[in-house]
Image (tube, rainbow, N blue to C red):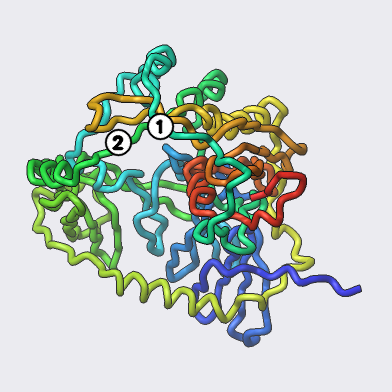
């Protein structure tokens, strides 16, 4: 019996001298295509023991240099991104390092540059909510307050079955379903917290806010009265160069840096003196990056003060330039898709994450918490009444169950929805990836509502015993 091929999925293709490096997009393996033997002579490099983020990998990035390529693995949370990296050369592996929340801003023959996890939008001058550390209901109402509010009349949850017919404009899209097994790349949760109680409380205030304006003039008046805020000055930051042997060199810069290039003995830093300016109409922002050039023939400086150096405005790349760059990468990858078979290559998969039962249960609880309160009423403010009222949720009878053992644990969420009369809907979400690392599901209930409300779900005919798997 023939064995199905296990093809490498190219992350990118990097030329190092006359050889090519073709790393996999998710697995710890790269093909080395040797120039001396032609395209069919391949050696394999693997790094199954390299460091990984604790959560599932959302994506990998390739940062090429003339001597090899840095593979950066990113794991997302709603509030935090963590990364690790490994340096791959045609003759071996080195430099498995943890980046923490630092983000890559450049790479050269001496190492990988990482900088501040924030971008310049963090200094846009727009107001942010008060954060005094207190845990509050996002709606600003306690449960007791909400129960005292008047209801908005929303009519029956489902229509009269004797008169209801499915409307043509509500036909679901054919053959569409979102099984968690196919969605492992969607990540996010609440931020990691050592307090186990936080997991139980994370979804306890899921009631939503909405505003019904009623009068279009309200929008026009608000736009006319809006005064764009003055962006703030970006703070100082450290840019760190991590060498393949793990050693680190730190350069302290007086403003946010989001790009680093080394050309011979000249170090170029792209920086932002301030956050982006808001357009007067409030619908866009304008970034104003600049660059400075620093002579590093005597070595990297400990400090760079951009305010004391000549700087030059940067012309932002256009969408066309970005699309051209993506197109070039896809063209490099295309030649190697479904061509390199990993069957029998030792070390080409990540080892199973070693987790205890308490940790596993905690990850299940983190995902479960996002569905708490899904059937709780929305709070709606309208100018017609001038006050806040309750509106019935579009969900009812929400049940969340756990199936399977790690790493095949799944959360099964079932419910009734006002947009899909006379059926119970059900969706499965995997909690862990194949290595046992927890998957993140960013804004999972938002995506769920989008799918159901837009009928981006399988046909009603696919329901079994009144339950439709979506």
Q: In x, y percent, where is residue 358?
A: 68, 25
Residue 183 at what x, y percent from top left?
60, 53
Which residue matches tag 2? Answer: 211
**Residue at the limit of the structure toward the right, as seen here:** 1
Q: Report the Cα–Cα distance between label 1 and label 2.
A: 10 Å
Toward the front, the furthest residue is 162
Looking at the rendered structure, the secondary structure element under dot 2 is strand
Which residue sits furthest top? 144
Q: Which residue is mark 1?
A: 208
Instruction: Tell me if label 1 and label 2 are in contact, CB under 8 Å.
Output: no
- Residue shown at 13%/47% (left/top)? 220
38 in relation to 9, above or below: below
Report which quarter residue 372 is drawn in. Answer: top right
Residue 23: horizontal and vertical position, in percent? 58, 66
Q: Is residue 289 left or right of residue 325?
A: left
Q: Nearer the viewer, residue 288 or 204?
A: 204
**Residue at the image point whose x is 30% and y is 73% from the top:** 321
Query: Nearer the viewer's eye, disc 1 or disc 2?
Result: 2
Residue 199 placement, left or right of 312: right
Q: Nearer the viewer, residue 62 or 382?
A: 382
Side (left or right) of 69 relative to 258: right
Instruction: Estimate the x, y position of residue 101 in percent, counting from the top left.
Output: 42, 41
Q: Quadrant of residue 33?
A: bottom right
Q: Left of 133 or right of it: where is 73?
A: right
Q: Residues within 10 Å of mark 2 (few under 14, many from 20)?
A: few
């Amino acid at each position: 019996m023939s064995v199905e091929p296990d093809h490498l999925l190219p992350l990118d293709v990097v030329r190092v001298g006359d050889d090519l490096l073709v790393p996999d997009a998710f697995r710890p393996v790269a093909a080395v295509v040797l120039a001396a033997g032609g395209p069919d002579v391949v050696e394999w490099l693997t790094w199954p023991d390299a460091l990984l983020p604790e959560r599932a990998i959302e994506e990998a990035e390739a940062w090429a240099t003339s001597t090899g390529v840095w593979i950066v693995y990113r794991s997302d949370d709603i509030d935090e991104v963590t990364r690790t990296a490994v340096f791959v050369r045609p003759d071996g592996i080195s430099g498995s390092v943890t980046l923490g929340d630092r983000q890559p801003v450049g790479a050269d023959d001496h190492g990988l540059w990482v900088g501040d996890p924030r971008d310049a939008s963090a200094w846009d001058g727009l107001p942010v909510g008060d954060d005094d550390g207190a845990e509050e209901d996002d709606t600003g109402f306690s449960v007791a307050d909400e129960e005292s509010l008047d209801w908005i009349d929303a009519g029956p949850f489902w229509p009269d079955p004797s008169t209801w017919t499915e409307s043509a404009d509500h036909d679901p899209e054919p053959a569409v379903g979102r099984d968690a097994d196919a969605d492992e790349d969607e990540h996010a949760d609440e931020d990691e917290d050592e307090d186990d109680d936080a997991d139980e409380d994370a979804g306890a205030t899921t009631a939503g806010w909405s505003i019904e304006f009623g009068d279009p003039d309200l929008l026009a008046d608000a736009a006319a009265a809006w005064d764009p805020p003055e962006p703030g000055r970006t703070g100082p930051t450290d840019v760190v160069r991590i060498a393949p042997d793990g050693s680190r060199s730190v350069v302290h810069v007086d403003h946010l840096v989001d790009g680093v290039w080394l050309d011979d003995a000249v170090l170029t830093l792209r920086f932002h003196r301030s956050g982006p300016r808001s357009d007067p109409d409030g619908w866009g922002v304008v970034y104003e990056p600049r660059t400075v050039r620093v002579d590093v023939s005597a070595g990297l400086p400990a400090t760079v003060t951009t305010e004391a150096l000549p700087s030059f405005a940067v012309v932002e790349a256009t969408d066309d330039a970005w699309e051209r760059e993506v197109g070039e990468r896809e063209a490099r990858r295309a030649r190697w898709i479904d061509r390199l078979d990993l069957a029998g290559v030792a070390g080409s998969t990540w080892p199973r994450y070693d987790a205890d039962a308490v940790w596993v249960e905690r990850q299940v609880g983190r995902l479960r918490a996002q569905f708490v309160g899904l059937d709780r009423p929305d709070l709606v403010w309208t100018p017609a009444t001038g006050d806040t009222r309750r509106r019935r949720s579009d969900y009812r009878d929400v049940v969340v169950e756990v199936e399977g053992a790690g790493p095949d644990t799944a959360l099964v969420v079932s419910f009734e929805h006002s947009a899909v009369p006379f059926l119970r809907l059900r969706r499965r979400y995997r909690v862990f990836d194949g290595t046992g690392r927890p998957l993140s599901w960013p804004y999972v209930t938002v995506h769920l509502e989008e799918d159901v409300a837009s009928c981006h779900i399988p046909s009603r005919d696919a329901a079994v015993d009144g339950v439709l798997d979506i």
